[in-house]
Amino acid sequence: MRNNKLGGDMGLSALFKGLGGFLELVSDLAENQGEIHKEGNFEDDSGRVRGVYGITLRTEIGGKTRLETFGNVRRTESGPVVEETREPLFDLFDEGEEFHILVELPGADPSGISLHICDDILDIEAEGPGRKYAREILLPALPDRESLSHTFANGILEIRLKKGGSPHVQQD
C-alpha cells in the first residue's frame, strides 16, 4: 500500500471507505433475499442516453454467488468504451426436463429477434428502433434444439428448451 500524506486513493481512509462499501453491499444482499441490482447510464451533451451499465449480484441455492453484468459499456485496456450493442440481463431456470430463460429486451421489435443454438450455447440477437442487443448464454446441459419455443411481450423474451440434445451446430 502506498502511503500518501494527502489522503489519496491508496491511503487508510480509502481502505476503510472501500471496506464500508463492501459491508454495505453484503448487508444489501442479505436484506434483498440474495439479490442486488445496480445500474446507471451515460448521456451525451444533448441528454440522449449513450451508455447503459449495471450488475446483478445473486446468492443462489447452496450459497454460490453469481455476478452478472449487462449494458453496452465495456472495459478495455484504454478505459471504458460505449458500444452500440447492449448485453441484456437474463435469468436461467433449470426446471428438470427443460430450461426456462427470461431475457430483458426493452424496445426490441419482435421481428428483430433471432435465436441460434450451437452445442450448449444459446445466442440471442435483437433489434428495435435505436437499440441492438446480443447475448451468449452457456446452458448447463445440451438442449434439444427442436424443442425451442419462445414468446415476446412487454420487452421480455421468454424461451423454453427441453434437455437431451446431442452436440450439433445449427446452420443459418
Image (cartoon, grey):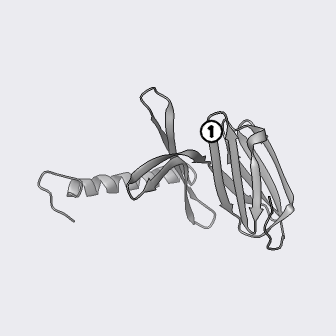
Name the outermost residue toward the front.
172
Q: Residue at x 84, y 70 (%)?
A: 165
Residue 38 showing in the rendered view: no
Relative to 64, 146 lies left or right: right
Of the 4 image quadrants, the one containing the C terminus is bottom right
Q: Residue at x 76, y 61 (%)?
A: 117
Q: Quadrant of residue 22?
A: bottom left
Relative image position of residue 140 (x, y in whole percent): 71, 68
Taking 33 as reference, is 50 above or below it? above
Q: Residue at x 25, y 54 (%)?
A: 14
Name the outermost residue toward the left.
5
Relative image position of residue 19 (x, y in whole percent): 33, 57
Name the outermost residue toward the top.
46
Of the 4 image quadrants, the one containing the N terminus is bottom left
Relative image position of residue 36 (x, y in whole percent): 53, 49
**Number of marks drawn:** 1
Residue at which label 1 appears = 131
Q: Secondary structure at mark 1?
A: strand
Relative to 165, 138 lies left or right: left
Taking 100 as reference, is 132 above or below it? above
Q: Quadrant of residue 111?
A: top right
Q: Quadrant of residue 123?
A: bottom right
Relative to 69, 97 lies left or right: right
Name the outermost residue toward the bottom.
167
Relative image position of residue 65 (x, y in whole percent): 55, 63
Q: Residue at x 70, y 53 (%)?
A: 124
Residue 93 showing in the rendered view: yes
Residue 123 or 137: which is nearer the viewer?
A: 123
User: Tag 1: Cα neighbours inside 10 Å, few (<14), some, or many (≥20)?
Assistant: some
Disc 1 residue type (three-letter)? Arg
